[in-house]
Amino acid sequence: MYQYNDFDQAFVRERVAEFRDQVERRIAGSLTEAEFLPLRLRNGLYLQLHAYMFRIAIPYGTLNSRKMRQLAMIADRWDKGYGHFTTRQNIQFNWPKLRDVPDILDALADVEMHANQTSGNCIRNVTADHFAGAAADEIEDPRATAELLRQWSTDHPEFLYLPRKFKIGITGAPNDRAATKTHDIGLRMVRSSDGLPGYEVSVGGGLGRTPIIGKVVREYLPKADLIPYLEAILQVYNLAGRRDNKFKARLKILVNETGLDEIRQQIEARFAEKRAEWPPINPGLLAEIEAAFTPPVFEPAAPVAPVLSAGLRSFIDTNVAEHKQPHYAIVTVSLKPIGGTPGDATSHQMRVLADIAEELGHDDLRISHEQNVVFPHVPRRHLPEIYDRLKAAGLATANIGLVSDIIACPGMDYCSLATARSIPVAQEIAETFADIDRQRDIGPLKIKISGCINACGHHHVGHIGILGLDRAGVENYQITLGGDATETAVVGDKTGPGFAYDEVVPAVERLIGAYLDMRTEPGETFLETFRRVGMGPFKAALYEEVRSDAA
Amino acid sequence: MARKFQPQMATGNDLFEGDVVYFTSTGCWSRDIGDAALAVNSEAADDLLARASAFPNEVVSVYLVDSAIDDRGRAAPAHFREVFRTRGPSNYPEHGRQAESV
Ligand code: SF4
């Protein structure tokens, strides 16, 4: 894992001291709320519906046991004993008190964590494939690049006041698990014709009010050119991005209004200048960063006992993925127990996860944008013990990728921007499909729910997307179908009129029923069926029954 | 015909705790929505907001919102967002204001 150097450490401590002083001045009344607001947002502190909310960055989703235990300590000491993992690979605490936040920041700095750049119109926390460094399909671990980007973008003077927030997502594998095409810049590792790893660069992706899938602006960029090329993109955006209208200020709008070819030319022109003036990246620095992401020392292959228990077998079927090393596995721990809040973990569960990672998983933990926790490096022989320990902590739900593995944003249970609730909708869908055999029969299905148009729950790219709106003072839910967040990314299509709160779950049931009736064989997934038959039959199933009910 | 004036109340969040508070007719802040002062015409609403905004170092994010009136003549939430603000998150009944009333 990347260790802070003295510079990083001093920088983070300085920021904490500065914020402590700002909080004191706010409490004393010498800073007004208008002055304080941007300062607290810069430090990850939001005011939500019922309390403050504190958002902590987990760069490229990577943690170790020490960091995870510190998060558990923070949850117990300054919050209500739990934390919420988000779709941006952050963790949020929902109940901090203003006076305590500087202490929490200090506790984070003790384990080399911070809350910088989790808000504001800057380059946000860079997100990465949660299987980075472990996945069998990976070309290279993308996190060295992600860390380089973090260092480059942290307090970059030119890019602190961009027209809008700016998100970068990165994956080192051709299979995109990091939803890179929904980011302002998406980086997907590919090989050149002579086999050298580099990046395919997409620009102008983003969800929210105007969902757009990123467009490939460069099919192959050598790794060494990454920073000058990204600076070129940022400079083009910083100059031409629309500051006059918040809703048109993201890069995606600029790309659409300017046209991809024109934007490409502008970027390439800047890049040519940048590349000439940009010193090559200090090889010592790069080597230092890359060394931080060298794989663990894998143990030798050992015989694995046959799996006898049905519970373990089902867990392995759904929650375990192929590792680069055949005798290793990647284990995804579901934070979606039936009826639970997607993405929430108690402090006890955090400690159990930390212990397992430390003792059995090379001390590595990841947070996925799908709000689950990953042990990226687990010797297969440890799977039974890990399963038992997870089970004892209520963490062994075998539903990864299935209908109850739902992404849901906090919605109107917490978020002050929400127009409707999302968590209880997720809970009810999961309860309706609680039977694991039924879930497995339905197969891979991604349901994603957002509580407002900002789309933190990625509903546009859910196979079934649900968006909660306020229609004349009543919660109303709009459904989209056929969205996809992977390398075949596409924005889902709206089905038609929305549904009242208590009609959403029956609507989802009708959609799934229609899929089961229409699939050619059990192996054909929901998304495949949708792509084959199109919207018509799903729409018929969704609305005709409503009409016949009304008749 | 002019729309009938919907009574308004002033609400905000406590600077220190971040929790929901309501501006009362005695000119202070309460955690009970029933204590909220009601403005029944637009001049009274302007005046209410002005008075409620005079505590910049105690209460933040102050705004006026439509109020219903319960059967005892007290302020009550009109919109579902305000209903949730009186309770707390629905996924944890033991958290937020709702925990105090059980
Ligand atoms: S999608 Fe809307 S409601 Fe949900 S967390 Fe984002 S801003 Fe809040």
Image (cartoon, coloured by chain):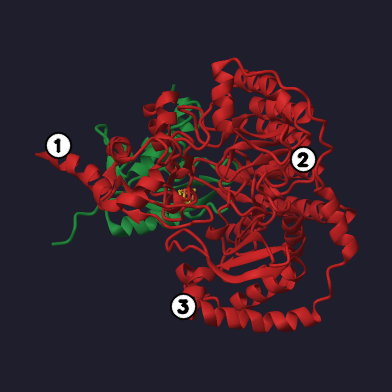
Chain colours: A red, B green
Question: Quadrant of the rendered structure where residue A513 is?
Answer: top left
Disc number placed over residue A257 in the picture, else none: 3
Name the secondary structure under disc 2.
helix
Q: Chain of mark 2?
A: A
Of labels 1 and 2, earlier in sequence is 2
Name the secondary structure under disc 1.
helix
Give the residue at the far left of this rendering: A551
Circle 2: residue type: Ala
Circle 3: residue type: Glu
Q: Quadrant of the C terminus of chain A?
A: top left
Identify residue for label 2. Answer: A107
The x and y percentages for residue A54 are 62, 45
Note whether A15 is above or below A104 in the view shown.
below
Name the secondary structure under disc 3.
helix
Front residue of this view, candidates A246 and A319: A319
Disc number placed over residue A401 in the picture, else none: none
Circle 1: residue type: Asp
Of labels 3 and 1, earlier in sequence is 3
Identify residue for label 1. Answer: A549
Q: Chain of mark 1?
A: A
Front residue of this view, candidates A303 and A127: A303
Front residue of this view, candidates A396 and B21: A396
> CA separation, marks 3 and 1?
45 Å
Q: Nearer the viewer, mark 1 or mark 2?
A: 1
The x and y percentages for residue A227 are 74, 69
Let me know if residue B32 appears in the view. Answer: no
The x and y percentages for residue A230 are 68, 70
Q: Nearer the viewer, mark 3 or mark 2?
A: 3
> CA separation, marks 3 and 2?
45 Å
Residue B17 shown left or right of residue A493 in the figure: right
